[in-house]
Amino acid sequence: MKLANNKATLSFSNGSPSVDMPVYSGSIGPDVIDIRKLYAQTGMFTYDPGFLSTAACQSAITFIDGDKGELLYRGYPIEQLAVNCDYMETCHLLLYGELPDAEGKAKFSRLVSMHTMVNEQMQFFLRGFRRDAHPMAIMTGLVGALSAFYHDSTDINNPQHREIAAIRLIAKMPTLVAMAYKYTQGQPYIYPRNNLSYAGNFLHMMFATPCEDYVVSPVLERAVDRIFTLHADHEQNASTSTVRLCGSSGTNPFAAIAAGVACLWGPAHGGANEACLNMLEDIQKMGGISKVGEFMEKVKDKNSGVKLMGFGHRVYKNYDPRAKLMQETCKEVLAELGLENDPLFKLAMALEKIALEDDYFVSRKLYPNVDFYSGIVQRAIGIPVPLFTAVFALARTVGWIAQLNEMIGDPEYKIGRPRQLFTGSTARNVLPLGQR
Ligand code: SDX
């Protein structure tokens, strides 16, 4: 970052001395006011619950322009990456800052393939869960359990250790998600196959059985790979900020990623894809498109607590570019599978059309986000609804670990320790029990 040709002066109406604060610029996007010395100079904190106006770090990985609906991974527009690259190239880009050439891609993909198996002990963690446990509960446990292994590489201040932890996490997440799925189905785990692509291997581990060969469909393989790319990273979202804050204590990197999995599960975040599909199925049961108007009235009634899941975003105040690409993927997959008339896809498009013409949504700049269509395409592929967020976590792992490693690699980083506006009781004395 560089000092901008500007500064911020904070003045107080109560006559307290004003304070000058430097303004810094990045390469693109909003400038920042450096308030790091504010408390020392004024004895006051800034107040920004939800971090609507706070840059918690500097980063060179992902840029979002919410007004334009623009998303760049290391400067490349998501629209170009989704069409011209695959997820392995995207992982290389996010981790190392550049797209690989053919040789580099082959080397990176091979390195990931060589780490796709998990320790055989991992199977015993699964046995502790009920068969009907939510996959994200299982994943939070399994990813956390990974921190009990790999003691050869947990010095996060060692760049080689950070890199092998990244490779292991990217490589093992598909294996763990597939194991979580197989466990809930009562089916045997399917080992990774190094001769398959990253997405193909995931499909094979999910849907193959020991009883017969499973041939990976190129259409589904490409769709799954596209879903992974669209979910790979997204600036300082809630789960990425969780990983950064957790990792800032110097904890085990696998434990920090487990914290990200836990945060992503929430319906306001990555859990929205599952919630959106359930919402579409509920409207379908109520009567489908004919009931959309009635449903929208509930959404607009603050007292109902009903939200249009898959709509709205803290940053995008325009169409989420990933939602457009996901809708295209939906159309391609449904057409390939002969499901063009999928009622839920038609319902989703009808909901979108109505919402984009309704002042409640237009005035609040609420548009479809990445979660609005991702569930429909995952359901068409055969991925069960409760597994949608686990697939999101699988895909986002590269973003989480790239951001964590970027933070740890910054010599200026410190443990994160926000302050508060205290509104509780002032100091008072404890009375003996008999006098309370
Ligand atoms: C992800 O941050 C990221 O980058 C996340 C993510 C990523 O890749 O990591 O993009 C992934 O989490 C996408 C978001 C998925 N969540 C959902 O689809 C759940 C539904 N959306 C909402 O919960 C909401 O839009 C949020 C949580 C996404 C954003 O909430 P904000 O920014 O805190 O905005 P807000 O709740 O203050 O909403 C502003 C207004 C409010 O109305 P008013 O108080 O102004 O009258 O818009 C309303 C909200 O009630 N609103 C909605 C709505 N979203 C916001 N009303 C109905 N349906 C919705 N979906």
Image: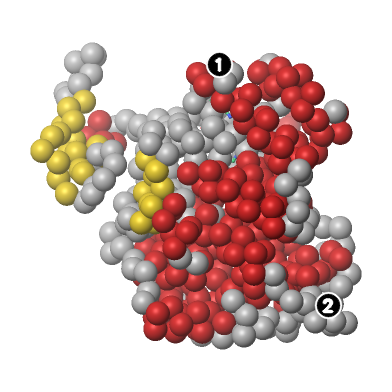
Mark 2 burial class by Cα count in 10 Å: few <14, some 14-19, many 20+: some
Q: Residue at x 71, y 17 (%)?
A: 297
**Sequence order check: which comes first, mark 1 or mark 2?**
2
- Which label is found at residue 395? none
Instruction: Farthest residue to the left: give it.
Output: 5
Amino acid type at mark 2? Thr
Q: Is residue 232 left or right of residue 282?
A: left
Front-lying residue, 135 or 382: 382
Q: Is residue 123 left or right of residue 358?
A: right
Helix or strand or loop: what does disc 2 sit on? loop
Tell me which colouring the rendered structure shows: secondary structure
- How many numbered marks are there? 2
Which residue is under mark 1? 359
Which quadrant would the C terminus be assigned to in this image? top right
- Residue 37 is at least partly visible in this image: no
- Residue 188 is at least partly visible in this image: yes
Q: Is residue 280 left or right of residue 158?
A: right
Front-lying residue, 200 or 307: 200
- In the rendered image, the vertical position of residue 388 relative to residue 278, given as above or below: below
Q: Position of residue 323 (x, y in %)?
A: 55, 43
Helix or strand or loop: what does disc 1 sit on? helix
Q: Residue at x 62, y 60 (%)?
A: 223
Q: Quadrant of residue 120?
A: bottom right
Q: Quadrant of ligand 1?
A: top right
Indicate yes or no: mark 1 CB to ligand 1 under 8 Å.
Answer: no
Front-lying residue, 400 or 332: 332
Which residue is under mark 2? 209
Front-lying residue, 202 or 348: 348
Q: Residue at x 85, y 81 (%)?
A: 212
Q: Position of residue 338 (x, y in %)?
A: 76, 54
Structural distance between the alpha carbons of marks 1 and 2 = 50 Å
Q: Is residue 301 left or right of residue 68?
A: right
